[in-house]
Image (cartoon, helix red, strand yellow):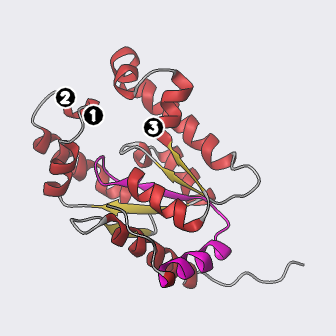
């Protein structure tokens, strides 16, 4: 059940929104909660939320499993890269929005570089046990179809962790209520901005 936002949480989000001038991009493994956390974060910040996988499906007029089955993973990753670039660059009247990416998106060097220069990447991390439990709730994970899901997830974590580690912010998404994860993301973003060098006056 969702709870109403506490006044202090709302105030912290409002203060953060006033300082953000780029999209917040959630990265991390499948099942970590990027979409659900992203929706709650965007609601608190009062900005748009975009799920990159949903945008890909809309652009292709196919589901993610159908894209994998018809065109293969390489073609999917190329389309994913182009869609994420459009989502980051085409932010409309305000540069602020929250974008949830697919699990493999941040592994692509071009996508990772784009997010690093045009957005703020937040790595949502979780234990293997948590990911196994969460991914078992949905039967739409193409990469988990052929083999033991725990073994596949363990391998993907090992392969992708070095790329995820390039995100400047890391927040653990555990068994606590997701609203706590959202609060932790807000705190981490605030701390990240506090540590950035002050911008000097324009010449």
Neighbourhood count class around disc 1 (C-alpha, 10 Å): few under 14, some 14–19, many 20 upward: some
Residue that mark 3 sits on: 53
Instruction: Measuring from the top left, give residue 5's x and y in whole percent.
Output: 46, 73
Residue 5 in sight here: yes
The answer to if 115 sits in the magenta stretch is no
Tag 3 and tag 1, C-beta contact below 8 Å? no
Instruction: Measuring from the top left, give residue 38's x and y in whole percent.
Output: 46, 57
Describe residue 7's horizontal placement relative to residue 128 as left or right. Answer: right
Tag 1 and tag 2, C-beta contact below 8 Å? yes
Query: Which residue occupies 55% across, 42% down?
Result: 84
Residue that mark 1 sits on: 141
> The residue tagged with tag 3: helix, strand or loop?
helix
Query: Which residue occupies 24% across, 45% down?
Result: 156
Query: Which residue occupies 30% across, 56% down?
Result: 161
Q: Judge whether 138 appears above or below 113 on screen.
A: above
Residue that mark 2 sits on: 145
Pick the front one: 88 or 58: 58
Q: Earlier in the sequence, mark 3 or mark 1?
A: 3
Q: Please state the extent of the stretch shown in magenta in the rendering.
A: 8-34
Q: Judge whether 53 appears above or below 69 on screen.
A: below
Q: Quadrant of the N terminus?
A: bottom left
> The residue tagged with tag 2: helix, strand or loop?
loop
- C-alpha distance separating marks 1 and 2: 7 Å
Tag 3 and tag 2, C-beta contact below 8 Å? no
């Amino acid at each position: 059940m969702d709870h109403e936002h506490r006044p202090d949480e709302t105030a912290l989000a409002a203060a953060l929104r006033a300082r953000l001038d780029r999209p917040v991009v959630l990265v991390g493994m499948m099942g970590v909660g990027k979409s659900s956390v992203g929706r709650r974060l965007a609601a608190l910040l009062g900005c748009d939320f975009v799920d990159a996988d949903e945008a890909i499906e809309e652009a292709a007029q196919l589901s993610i499993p159908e894209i994998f089955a018809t065109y293969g993973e390489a073609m999917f990753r190329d389309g994913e890269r182009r869609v994420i670039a459009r989502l980051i660059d085409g932010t409309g009247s305000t540069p602020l929005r929250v974008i949830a990416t697919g699990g493999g998106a941040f592994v692509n060097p071009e996508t990772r570089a784009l997010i690093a220069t045009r957005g703020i990447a937040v790595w949502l991390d979780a234990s293997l046990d948590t990911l196994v439990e969460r991914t078992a709730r949905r039967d739409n994970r193409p990469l988990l179809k052929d083999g033991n899901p725990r073994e596949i997830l363990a391998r993907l974590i090992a392969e992708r962790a070095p790329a995820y580690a390039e995100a400047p912010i890391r927040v653990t998404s555990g068994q606590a209520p997701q609203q706590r994860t959202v609060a932790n993301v807000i705190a981490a973003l605030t701390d990240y901005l506090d540590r950035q060098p002050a911008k000097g006056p324009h010449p």
